[in-house]
Image: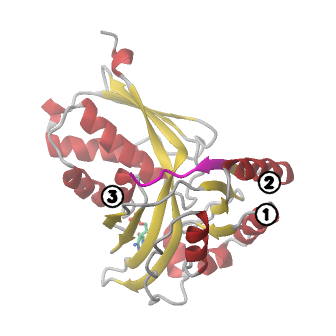
């Protein structure tokens, strides 16, 4: 069989923190979080297949600036899994990453790529490793990796690694907007003025669009002010989403990507067209989040 025939493409979805409260700080400097995260039906794509020797390449609109060496989280994920399973079980692979998400932008791009690599490689190599094993390897690569491995609506606590998947959560019509600026996560955490905030309020019983929006009004992204002080462009993105009719707008993760919530997919698509026309240099994507199953 041709190697290409065995290759498979995996979506590395954008991670969106609908709410993110910073509740404390660990002795090692990592922050304790309480966050509700969802995953988009849009993201990077990873094609993974057998090859004569290991290969890794990057294409797509945000390929520039992505390291293709051992610094890339995808390569680190491949090597971490290989160390765990042994070289005999893990023959060479070719991985092609299509980078559709902006870099260092608060939607978990690199973590989601690495999570897709772990899931895809474990399947291709037919490894006898369970979800908890993959999450453990993932966590050694980054705090967001375990949630990206799940890619379902969830509450994340601890440093983002203690996960409670939601049994009920609707698909949401969203527009993602990045004003073309990268933000360093450690810098944003460093710029926080308050590190001990209250936990998220409980979720309401009725989780339709209105229920979700009302709940969002009671929550925050505690990283937003710190990120805006570093990158004022974030305020422009939020303003543009509201002007285009978003029922709710907030920054995701440590920024700079912001999301707008819309009542229908058509409203979201129209808003995306409007924002793109006004801000041709920005990243703008209308998408739907994945619901709980
Ligand atoms: O784990 P990861 O490498 O993705 O985290 C990047 C940086 O973000 C950490 O070095 C740390 O400065 C900060 N961080 C944090 N608390 C978290 C997650 C990340 O302070 N829960």
Q: Decide which of 180, 166 is in the foreground and name it.
A: 166
**Magenta-drawn segment:** 285-293
| Residue 146 image label | 3
- In the rendered image, residue 196, in percent from the top left (x then y), is placed at 44, 90
Question: CB under 8 Å between callouts 3 and 1?
Answer: no
**Residue at horizontal 51%, vertical 90%?**
194
Q: Dot 2, how many residues are within 10 Å of its Cα: few (below 14), some (14-19), or many (20+)? A: many
Residue 14 in sight from this viewpoint? yes
Question: CB under 8 Å between callouts 1 and 2?
Answer: yes
Circle 2: element type: helix
| Residue 54 against residue 132 in the figure, above or below | above
Mark 2 — residue? 275
Mark 1 — residue? 240
* Alpha carbon separation for disc pair 1 and 2: 7 Å
| Residue 3 against residue 285 in the figure, above or below | above
* Alpha carbon separation for disc pair 2 and 3: 33 Å
């Amino acid at each position: 069989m041709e190697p290409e025939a065995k290759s498979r493409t995996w979506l590395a979805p954008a991670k969106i923190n609908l709410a993110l409260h910073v509740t404390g700080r660990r002795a090692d400097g990592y922050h304790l979080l309480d966050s509700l995260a969802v995953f988009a039906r849009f993201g990077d794509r990873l094609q993974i297949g057998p090859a004569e020797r290991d290969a890794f390449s990057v294409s797509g609109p945000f390929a520039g600036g992505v390291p293709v060496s051992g610094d890339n989280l995808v390569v680190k994920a491949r090597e971490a899994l290989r160390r765990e399973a042994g070289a005999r079980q893990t023959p060479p692979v070719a991985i092609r990453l299509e980078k559709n998400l902006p870099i260092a932008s608060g939607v978990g791009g690199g973590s989601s790529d690495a999570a897709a690599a772990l899931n895809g490689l474990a399947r291709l190599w037919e490894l006898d490793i369970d979800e908890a094993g993959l999450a453990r390897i993932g966590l050694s690569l980054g705090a967001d990796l375990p949630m990206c491995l799940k890619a379902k609506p969830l509450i994340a606590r601890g440093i983002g690694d203690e996960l409670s998947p939601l049994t009920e959560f609707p698909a949401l019509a969203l527009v993602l907007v990045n004003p073309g600026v990268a933000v360093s996560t450690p810098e944003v955490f460093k710029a926080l003025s308050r590190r001990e905030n209250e936990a998220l309020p409980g979720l309401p019983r009725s989780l339709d669009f209105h229920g979700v929006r009302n709940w969002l009004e009671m929550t925050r992204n505690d990283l937003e002010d710190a990120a805006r002080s570093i990158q004022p462009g974030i305020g422009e993105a939020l303003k543009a989403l509201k002007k285009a009719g978003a029922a709710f707008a907030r920054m995701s993760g440590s920024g700079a990507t912001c999301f707008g919530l819309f009542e229908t997919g058509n409203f979201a698509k129209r808003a995306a067209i409007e924002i793109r026309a006004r801000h041709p240099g920005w990243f703008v994507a209308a998408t739907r989040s994945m619901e709980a199953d």
